[in-house]
Amino acid sequence: MAEGSGPGAAGGEALLFLTDEQLRKGIEAMFFAYRGFTADPDRILAEHGYGRAHHRAIHFINRTPGTTVNNLLAILGVTKQSLNRVLRTLVEDGLVESRVGKRDKRERHLFLTERGQELEQALSDAQRARMRAAYRAAGPEAVAGFRKVLEAMMEPELRRHYVRDAESVG
Amino acid sequence: MAEGSGPGAAGGEALLFLTDEQLRKGIEAMFFAYRGFTADPDRILAEHGYGRAHHRAIHFINRTPGTTVNNLLAILGVTKQSLNRVLRTLVEDGLVESRVGKRDKRERHLFLTERGQELEQALSDAQRARMRAAYRAAGPEAVAGFRKVLEAMMEPELRRHYVRDAESVG
DNA sequence: CTTGGAATGTCAACAACGCTGACTTACCCT
DNA sequence: AGGGTAAGTCAGCGTTGTTGACATTCCAAG
């Protein structure tokens, strides 16, 4: 189990970054960074009486307008019942429009209304600002590494949904 | 707001990694990666009837044995009432011991019992395995960048709790 | 064409875990 | 000794995850 417990234990100096202690640091970094990552949107959402679940739905509907509920489920990884509750409130509040599918009437295609797009803008502006500051502070090479590690951390199933391209940075 | 909307718009090629599109990718990478990050511990926790809140408490009690409830609150960023519910179940189940402070009897010092340490091992082994695989796949330089960006993303308040050191990797 | 199974989405009720409010106990300063 | 503050506990509520039951629609077999 404790494969790399001591410095230079398994594999020598080249694998120093794989010690349990280094891994623990990475774990805590993920925990603390994720808090910062969601802090700004959370504040905006709270003003509207929404939560993170609403943010996620709005984000991915904006990214792929006309997507179906089922599509969204695969990406968000929650039950359709959970998602449905969130979508219902967004539709009632006039932020999302749900159109019955033309080809398959069982499907509902989802779109942001104008007001929905406004909230999306506010949320992503806030989140991007934090991201931009972090990227700027860390520099392009760090960003490339950041993306590389995150991608390796995803479930293979979900990596499909993560559209990666144009990593011609460094 | 849309400061870096087009490639080469603001500041030229050197800032390509700050375009809105690149930032959106980073945002989704965080979202998907965090899911992977918590997936393995979540499965173990579910077997014991616990959730992520229990994991966080166990992790930080293990990291700093004898820490007080108040200390933990500052790190976890939840209300003491929320934390208390979690701690109560952990104490009832015999995974955590809560000792009244000697100097200040208002304080409760927290320790993992033997069984608590066993669960902590199982959880962190699982999480480290995922982290190790990601680190190994991405390489030492990517890991250094990963840590750098995450650190820049944290709330300054919390960065204090993130013990960084020995980044002599590259 | 009809019928049975599978897929999509909705409604209802429950559990985990955030939150605020009210409270007890203990400390400390005046 | 008394009053304010700090640490922790108990009670109750809201968001958002869960499972179960169900209506509608599609499609394929007969």
Image: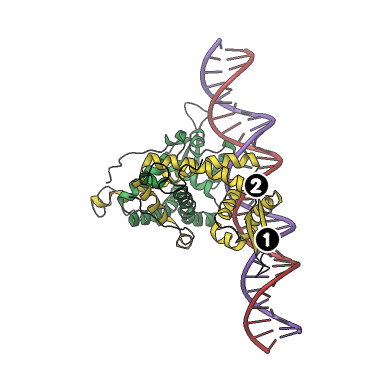
Chain colours: A yellow, B green, C purple, D red
Query: In the rendered view, does A101 fall on the left or right side of B76?
Result: right
Q: In front here: A18 or B62?
A: A18
Mark 1, residue position: A99
User: Disc 2 vs disc 1: Cβ atoms closer than 8 Å?
Assistant: no
Left or right placement of residue B47 versus residue B62 in this view: right
State which quadrant residue A45 falls in.
top right
Q: Is residue B27 visible?
A: yes
Label number found at residue B43: none
- Toward which corner of the image does residue D25 lie, by quadrant? bottom right
Q: Are there few (<14), some (14-19), or many (20+) residues within 10 Å of tag 2?
A: few
- The single residue placed furthest to the left in the displayed view is A12
**Mark 1: which amino acid?**
Arg
Question: In the image, D17: left or right of B60?
Answer: right
**Label 2 belongs to which residue?**
A115
Picture layout, residue B86 above or below residue A153: above
Horizontal and vertical percent position of residue B94: 51, 46
Chain letter for mark 2? A
Of callouts 2 and 1, the N-terminal one: 1
Which quadrant is the N terminus of chain A positioned in?
Answer: bottom left
Residue under mark 1: which chain is it in? A
Percent position of residue B53, x then y: 53, 46
Total of numbered circles in the picture?
2
Q: Is residue D25 above or below residue A53?
A: below
**Residue D7 place in picture, x, y as percent:** 53, 30
Residue situated in front as seen by the camera: A31 or A132: A132
Q: Amino acid at mark 2?
A: Arg
Q: In the rendered image, is residue A51 in sight?
A: no
Q: CA distance from mark 2 to mark 1?
A: 17 Å
- Local SS, label 1: strand
Crowdedness near tag 1: few (<14), some (14–19) or many (≥20) residues, C-alpha within 10 Å = some
Instruction: Please tell me whether mark 2 sits on a helix, a strand or a loop.
Output: helix
